[in-house]
Amino acid sequence: MLLAIDCGNTNTVFSIWDGEKFLCTLRTVTEHQRTADQYFVWLSTLLRHHKIEMEIDEVIISSTVPRVVYNLRVFSDRYFDCRPLVVGKPECLLPVDVRVDEGTAVGPDRLVNTVAGFDLHGGNLILVDFGTATTFDVVAEDGAYIGGVISPGVNLSLEALHNAAAALPHVDISKPQAVIGTNTVACMQSGVFWGYIGLVREICTRIKAERGVPMKVVATGGLAPLFQQTEMLFDEYNDDLTMHGLTVIHKYNKDRGTI
Ligand SMILES: Nc1ncnc2c1ncn2[C@@H]1O[C@H](COP(=O)(O)OP(=O)(O)O)[C@@H](O)[C@H]1O
Ligand SMILES: CC(C)(COP(=O)(O)O)[C@@H](O)C(=O)NCCC(=O)O
Ligand SMILES: [K+]
């Protein structure tokens, strides 16, 4: 079975893929200090709880945090006796082109999203991923990643207000009742919530105008539904987009004998 690991700047997600479906998806905080042994204790405990046999013999990793990859490699080697496939490394082939400025190290999560989006929906896509940062990945007609947009994430924006202004509290995002807030928390939520609706709409409109072709907008990440329920910003929502992409990339490399 394949263990797919998607390491973001905030959370790391582990999914077990049996070749047809995901048996479970587990989430932990991203910490580069975490050792291979700590990953194993955490994973084996949860798999036992979910009554899933630990029959992992293949591992694929996408990480936006380069420092965690070393311990995840040791984890894979020590406990599953396998060399993981790491997205973004030269030995990991991608089924799509990457057409950006020379020397650009595109976030592996964005490449994985591109592969997943093209596999599920074909080309001409805008993929919006609500993570630590909110990224917009633009996928061309032929599936190539051709660039995009990086914006501060929703929680990051709220945290930045709290960290920089002495009188602003820690606030969680939610949909405010009105645009005009009548208390501090409501004012902050309004700024980020409605500001984000505007940000997403404006960026998608401008990307479509720049490309000059109809494009499908696909959103992923836990916060996407919050925005979708108010305004129809996205054509589709897929919470498993990145995990799906990891399985597609793994199969692509296996079929070509690189692993
Ligand atoms: N369903 C959700 N509801 C509320 N907040 C969420 C949800 N899913 C994720 N978040 C928050 O969104 C932020 C980004 O999370 P995540 O998608 O895990 O980021 P990354 O991929 O960059 O690690 C985090 O602050 C996380 O707590
Ligand atoms: C933009 C990101 C920080 C998003 O990371 P995430 O929010 O998923 O943790 C990540 O994709 C990244 O580090 N990218 C490198 C620069 C680029 O993609 O052009
Ligand atoms: K992201």
Image (cartoon, rainbow, N blue to C red):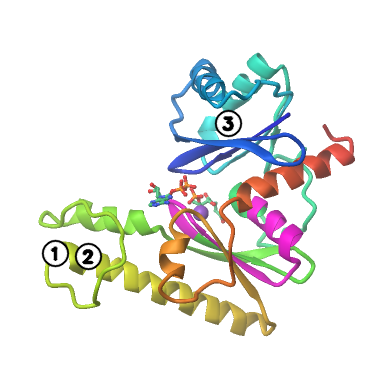
Quick one: label 1, few (<14), some, or many (20+) residues within 10 Å? few
Give whichever of discs 1 and 3 has the lower sequence position.
Answer: 3
| Quadrant holding the C terminus | top right
Task: Name, please, the residue furthest toward the right.
Answer: 256
Q: How many marks?
A: 3
- Specify whether tag 2 is near ligand 1 (CB below 8 Å): no
Residue 139, by quadrant, is bottom right
Q: Nearer the viewer, mark 3 or mark 2?
A: 2
Quick one: label 3, few (<14), some, or many (20+) residues within 10 Å? some
Q: Position of residue 118 (x, y in %)?
A: 73, 61
- Residue 137's place in the image compared with 254, above or below, is below
Separation (CA) of disc 2 from disc 1: 6 Å
Residue that numbered label 1 is attached to: 184
Left or right of residue 33, residue 80 in this image: right
Q: Residue at x 30, y 61 (%)?
A: 174
Residue that numbered label 3 is attached to: 69
Query: Residue 188 shows which numbered tag?
Result: 2
